[in-house]
């Protein structure tokens, strides 16, 4: 990729990406110039990227390019299996029309310290639409979709509403050792007769807590089958750590210091925002408040268009606590693409007895947790720092897949989101 990085100030203070970013079927950004990436149901930033097969529903992709050099970005759609591996289907098998499209809608920032170009895409378009349900990756690239040219990958879902799901979070889990610690997901799937062939083998269920993928449950098969009903009755239940409500800060304006913001500094090309020092919440009292489950909302003052007039700040995080040995501490939430990478890994300062880090963020409202990733592990634990309270109002999304034989692919035939309380 031959893009020019104009904002050298970022590299001086911003934690870099991994040295070599391998393109994967995950929510990732592969270019430091590309920021504030959102993919959502058209019209509502907080709605998940899901469309119904055959409908006129659309998703919106938006992002900013800090290089301030207009590019002709392209995109394509990749069909995946239920566990997010690239499926064996050819693009012509799951797409109608063209196999790639252009992102033609862009605007230059206006009256901001940080110059950028805002890009936006509404899709599917009439000339390129998915014709099969399932998991998909939206891939954005420059020139061609070779790994060195890819800028963004984002997950989305195309769903056939054929299976209904009845789900709940009971007060008492099956394993009483989990009482007041873990949240158990109980559910059954009601299936039509068209899915009568080999239901134990062909049906698979994934369950996700909030927006996380690192602790998701994958490939759950039914434990028993009755006429038109699949039951998932595991000995210890399907459980997740309860965790705690996310932390948050409101940065929709740089004219005033909202709660949890200690200082705002205006520099030549950007702002600096110092958050108040955070402390561990494990062992403390549970506090409830209305939250958006770790998501972020790009927004600004009423007299600003956040797309092109929203400005940028380097936001500094400080977490006062003893160092955790043989583990990394990360900022986790939509503001870090729900990823655990060098970009959002904190550094321990032994002189100040605290973890420190920073993120480049656009004006808006942000929620996050501090997560601990033990050495060699793929799954982070937020309970060590944030605490573990059964009352936490997590959201859980249940995805039901059916493995089709001709052609062979995983159909997404049911989805259900429930709140823990």
Image (spheres, rainbow, N blue to C red):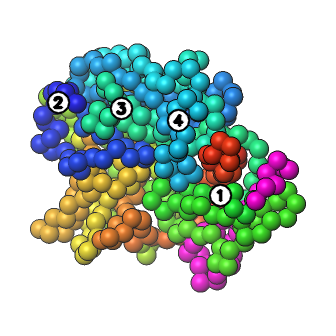
From this viewpoint, is residue 47 visible?
no
In percent of width and height, residue 199 lies at 75, 59
Q: What is the magenta range?
A: 170-198
Instruction: Name the residue beneath numbered marker 2.
Output: 5
Instruction: Name the residue beneath numbered marker 3.
Output: 145
Q: Secondary structure at mark 4?
A: loop
Pointer 2 with pointer 1, Cβ within 8 A? no
- Is 315 left, or right, of 367 in this rendering? left
Q: Secondary structure at mark 1?
A: strand
- In the image shown, does 185 or 244 lie closer to the viewer? 185
Q: Residue 419 appears in which quarter of the rendering?
A: bottom right
Q: CA distance from mark 3 to mark 1?
A: 30 Å
Q: CA distance from mark 4 to mark 1?
A: 23 Å
Instruction: Name the residue beneath numbered marker 4.
Output: 90
Pointer 4 with pointer 2, Cβ within 8 A? no
- The numbered mark, 3 or 4, whose residue comes first in the sequence reads 4
In percent of width and height, residue 401 lies at 66, 51
Residue at the spot 67% in from the left edge and 79% down from the top edge = 235
Residue at the spot 23% in from the left edge and 62% down from the top edge = 355
Give the answer, above or below, for where 113 lies relative to 321: above
Q: CA distance from mark 3 to mark 2?
A: 21 Å
Question: Would you say residue 244 sits in the magenta stretch?
Answer: no
Q: Secondary structure at mark 3?
A: loop
């Amino acid at each position: 990729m031959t893009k020019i990085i104009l904002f050298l100030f970022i590299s001086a203070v911003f934690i870099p990406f991994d040295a070599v970013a391998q393109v994967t079927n995950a929510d990732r950004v592969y270019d430091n110039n590309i920021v504030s990436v959102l993919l959502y149901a058209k019209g509502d930033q907080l709605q998940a990227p899901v469309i119904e097969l055959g409908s006129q529903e659309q998703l919106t992709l938006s992002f900013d390019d800090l290089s301030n050099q207009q590019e002709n970005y392209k995109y394509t759609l990749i069909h995946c299996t239920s566990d997010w591996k690239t499926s064996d289907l050819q693009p012509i098998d799951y797409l109608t029309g063209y196999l790639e499209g252009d992102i033609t809608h862009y605007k230059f920032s206006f009256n901001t310290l940080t110059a950028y170009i805002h890009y936006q895409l509404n899709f599917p378009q009439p000339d390129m639409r998915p014709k099969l349900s399932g998991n998909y990756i939206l891939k954005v690239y420059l020139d061609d979709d070779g790994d060195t040219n890819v800028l963004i990958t984002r997950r989305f879902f195309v769903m056939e509403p054929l299976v209904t799901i009845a789900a709940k979070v009971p007060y008492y889990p099956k394993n009483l050792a989990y009482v007041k610690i873990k949240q158990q997901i109980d559910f059954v799937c009601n299936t039509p007769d068209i899915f009568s062939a080999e239901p134990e083998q062909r049906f698979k269920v994934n369950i996700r807590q909030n927006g996380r993928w690192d602790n998701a449950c994958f490939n759950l098969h039914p434990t028993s089958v009755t006429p038109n009903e699949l039951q998932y009755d595991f000995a210890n239940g399907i459980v997740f750590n309860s965790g705690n409500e996310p932390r948050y800060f409101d940065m929709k304006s740089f004219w005033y210091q909202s709660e949890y913001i200690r200082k705002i500094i205006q520099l030549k090309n950007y702002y600096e925002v110092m958050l108040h020092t955070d402390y561990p919440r494990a062992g403390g009292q549970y506090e409830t408040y209305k939250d958006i489950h770790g998501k972020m909302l790009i927004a600004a003052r009423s007299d600003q268009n956040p797309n092109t007039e929203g400005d940028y700040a380097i936001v500094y995080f400080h977490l006062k606590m003893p160092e955790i040995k043989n583990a990394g501490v990360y900022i986790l939430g939509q503001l870090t693409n729900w990823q655990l990478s060098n970009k959002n890994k904190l550094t321990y300062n032994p002189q100040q007895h605290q973890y420190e880090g920073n993120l480049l963020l656009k004006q808006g409202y942000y929620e996050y947790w501090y997560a601990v990733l033990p050495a060699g592990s793929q799954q982070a634990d937020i309970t060590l720092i944030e605490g573990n309270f059964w009352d936490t109002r997590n959201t859980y999304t249940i995805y039901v897949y059916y493995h089709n034989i001709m052609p062979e692919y995983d159909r997404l035939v049911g989805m259900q989101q429930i709140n823990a309380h």
